[in-house]
Image: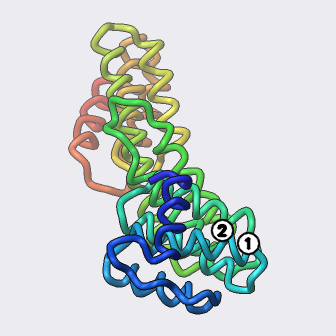
Amino acid sequence: MTRTAVAALALAVLAGCVGGMPKVPATPDAVLARAQEYQQKGKYVQAAALYQQFLERYAGHERADFAQFMLAETHFADGDYAQAAVDYQIVISSYGYSDYVDDALFKSGVCYWKQSPRPQRDQQKTMDALNRFNQYQQTFATGKHITEVDQYVREIHEKLAGKDYAAARWYFRQKNGAAAMVYCDKIIENYPDNRYYAMALYMKGDILLRRGQNEEAIKQFTRVLEYPEDLPVKRDAEAKIREARR
């Protein structure tokens, strides 16, 4: 729901015209209390309308940061991740002093991640999520969401690395080793925390071996063996090392 629609609904809510809801008492605390009641009951449209009205009527109130954060939470709970991301960003940019900035930065990253499309499509939302999570790691290194953030970053890295690896494989099959190498190097440089890192090293080694650059190929295959997880590609790398040394 757009802000205009929310504002229009808010006026109706406060006038007591929506669904027979009683008129909200005209005090800041009463507006917030009623908004929270609606939110707890899953009536997110009504709750968002009241939080919006609070922010418009009492912009300088000491609980404005709370109202803005709860407005974002309401949209998040309602599945409107695009609008929630906007509202969380307002918490971050307009209420930098607030205790809710930690939560807002984390949840904004989650919002973008939830909008992330399948790997074949443009990954701007995925990158937006990664940027928010990286910012969280830098700003709140010991924050309460850091464990979750680290996990999200690993998931995002794997998704992006998988997309690049698919491109590398396509070029490899087209016998375009130079183009495949570009994607392999991108994975190796940016995503060392997942299996595609080892797989990219192996492909790079294979390309070098086919070019007759045996020593350089062995270096790449050796790095595959150094990867901490036990992957099938390690056995392939061992075989390639033996081949390169003949």
Residue at 47% in and 12% down: 178
Q: Residue at x 32, y 73 (%)?
A: 19
Q: Is residue 44 above or below residue 241?
A: below
Which residue corresponds to mark 2? 91
Between the C-alphas of marks 2 and 1, the distance is: 5 Å
Query: What's the residue type where badge 2 is placed?
Result: Val
| Local crowd size for mark 1, using a 10 Å CA cut-off: few (<14), some (14–19), many (≥20) | some
Which residue is rendered at x = 40% and y = 27% of the image?
205
Query: In the rendered image, which quarter contains the N terminus?
Result: bottom left
Residue at x 68%, y 66% (from the top left corner): 92
Q: For residue 241, say whether it is visible.
A: yes
Q: Are marks 2 and 1 in contact (CB under 8 Å)?
A: yes
> Percent x, y for residue 240?
29, 29
The C terminus: image quadrant: top left
Instruction: Tell me where residue 139 sits by quadrant.
Output: bottom right
Residue marked by disc 1: 95
Within the image, what quadrant is residue 141 found in?
A: bottom right
Q: Position of residue 208 (x, y in %)?
A: 43, 19
Colour mode of the rendering: rainbow
183 up-or-down from 130: above or below: above
Tag 1 secondary structure: loop
Q: Position of residue 91 (x, y in %)?
A: 66, 68
Number of labels in the image equals 2
> Is 53 positioned to the left or the right of 17 in the image?
right
* Nearer to the camera, 19 or 192: 19
**Amino acid type shown at disc 1:** Tyr
Q: Is residue 1 above or below residue 39?
A: above
